[in-house]
Amino acid sequence: MLTLKNPLQRWARGLAVVVGIGLLASAPAHARHDHLASWTDGPAKKAIVEFVRKTTDKASPDYVAPAERIATFDNDGTLWAEQPMYVQAMFALDRVKALAPQHPEWQTQEPFASVLKGDLKGALAGGDKALLEIMMATHAGMTTDEFQQIVKDWIATATNPVTKRPYTEMVYQPMVELLAYLRAHGYKTFIVSGGGIEFMRPWAEQAYGVPPEQVVGSSIKTRFEMRDGKAVLVRLPEVNFIDDGEGKPIGINQNIGHRPIAAFGNSDGDRQMLEYATTGTGARFGMLVLHDDKAREFAYGPATGLPEGHIGTFSQALFDEAQKRGWTVVSMKNDWKTIFPAKK
Amino acid sequence: MLTLKNPLQRWARGLAVVVGIGLLASAPAHARHDHLASWTDGPAKKAIVEFVRKTTDKASPDYVAPAERIATFDNDGTLWAEQPMYVQAMFALDRVKALAPQHPEWQTQEPFASVLKGDLKGALAGGDKALLEIMMATHAGMTTDEFQQIVKDWIATATNPVTKRPYTEMVYQPMVELLAYLRAHGYKTFIVSGGGIEFMRPWAEQAYGVPPEQVVGSSIKTRFEMRDGKAVLVRLPEVNFIDDGEGKPIGINQNIGHRPIAAFGNSDGDRQMLEYATTGTGARFGMLVLHDDKAREFAYGPATGLPEGHIGTFSQALFDEAQKRGWTVVSMKNDWKTIFPAKK
């Protein structure tokens, strides 16, 4: 939030308000209300507004044609909460429980036995191999149409174990506003997440206004089949693409085919995406969300002075690179008036 | 073209014109001119117009919400000419010649030696392996930005060896109109081609009005790198994905995430895409372009009674499936008034 330390600042702010009112009289309808109402008037909001102004004002030397106004957003920890565990991991654990009656062998077979006993630590003792087994057992074997319905049904009722709120109400209100603000200014907004592309698509349009064709993510392989006269794609227990770290620019190139001019993330897995977006020619914008608000959300990551966790690491090295490259670091505590949307 | 064989038909046509004029008076601006002016008033155009009407008229039981109005188009032989050889193959051969000074070993090394001597038959004697070698030598080793520029420079001057016209003037005028017609009715149009995704993106927007993010195609792998402080993707000599046959629905799912409600192709490689699109629920549309106009374009494929070639096979089995599933088969000879746009 902007703190008005001295009379000069107060005067400047008063002037800005007066000039603002003057401008509003002739502004287009969509500019008449504050698209970014949940953002405090701090440096992050100022940086966003200035970037959008200079890239959309035809008189600006930094003007960007609408076709190139591509903005990419990480999902977990950037658009919605990723604590106490990635939402997709919660989905996988719930699916193990739901599928257990069809798999009596899971009662004694790890990592499933531990999951069914509610012993998460035991389940994850098998490391990446155990995690992959859980993912494949719960994400493969059905058609893409069936999986879409499974995700829709789950997300309609599942809730965050800490807040007890539905996951779709654990989206960050300021980021939802930012997505809409960019679109209102001719930007095309994409999700580029390490999460599963087909896990996000069923609900991303309703939650963020981002349609399925603008979601990029990790994926497993599929196989084409005709079943009862209907063409289907069967999800196979084989990784196709991991959209994280260096995979993000690769996934962006594969699915979008533009170098974005703006990119938004929150962790080390977003570093290469921000580098890819911000080292192109012309006006560029990089932003990282810092989870420093223990009271209203969660606080984690070395950049907050807290010990490193396994989820959404925001390392000191990333923080240093942000400073060096001029990326905006958003303090959830200081830059956001509210974190989550009002309860429905 | 519609042939008016008897007075009754003439009368019906006259009536249609009168009714048409009556309707135009109250039609919205975009409906006031014929979007499909290069199509004769035959069954193909009628089928298109009826499909668009029933999927966009809110009172229709077949109404489809804009978000689901996804139409996918094959490129080679569907949107532009693929004879006497795929355009991308012509590009590869030209690139071998352009790169030869940097590769003195190619003077004696097959398949390059044959290409440089202008002996195409000799070059292709090595089969798929030779073809792959030519593709990788010409399509990999540079950054994606560099490749984009190479394609742009090439397509600006290259011409079809038979017609001597630029390739971008060898697009099918009726299909360009169809793309625009669908978009004018809230459809999102995608290219889904066996051709290289990064070969098509640099010119598809200008030629078809299809932006890079709506192009799906075959691809090679890329690697993320920082070069002189700039993040780049380096194209590797390794196949990533073949977007043909069963690969088309898989590519559609990966890049678009919707089952299309309309699909357009011209060969056996498009069969699964049309099956995928047309076996979904609700109104569906499948169309295949038949190359039966030797005088104005090229005639090829068993479905025309001609011997099978290596390019764009339209088999009798595909023709039979089209009949069975109610897909519209476009006769270039009878359904299209003009084939190519006017010379520039």
Image (cartoon, coloured by chain):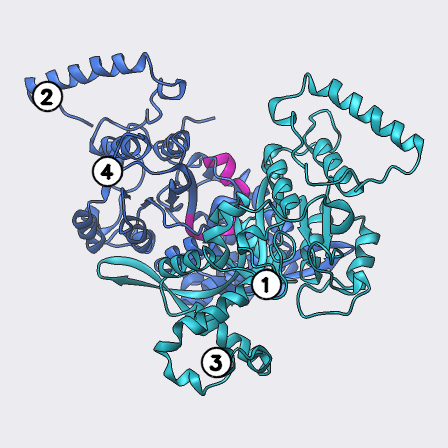
Chain colours: A blue, B cyan
Percent from the top left, x then y, of residue A181? 37, 30
Q: Secondary structure at mark 3?
A: helix
* Distance of label 1 from label 3 (alpha carbons): 39 Å
Q: Magenta residues?
A: A192-208
Whether residue A32 is situated above or below residue A313 in the rendered picture:
above
State if disc 1 and disc 2 touch (CB < 8 Å): no
Q: Amino acid at mark 4?
A: Ser
Q: Is residue A205 magenta?
A: yes
Percent from the top left, x then y, of residue A221? 56, 62
Percent from the top left, x then y, of residue B45? 75, 40
Q: Chain of mark 3?
A: B
Picture residue at 50% right of the left edge, 64% below the top: A239
Residue that badge 4 annotates? A331
User: Which is nearer the eye, B113 or A324?
Assistant: B113
Label 2 or label 3, whichever lies nearer to me, is 3
Residue that badge 1 annotates? A236
* Distance of label 2 from label 1 (alpha carbons): 61 Å
Quarter residue A129 falls in: bottom left
Picture residue at 50% right of the left edge, 81% below the top: B117
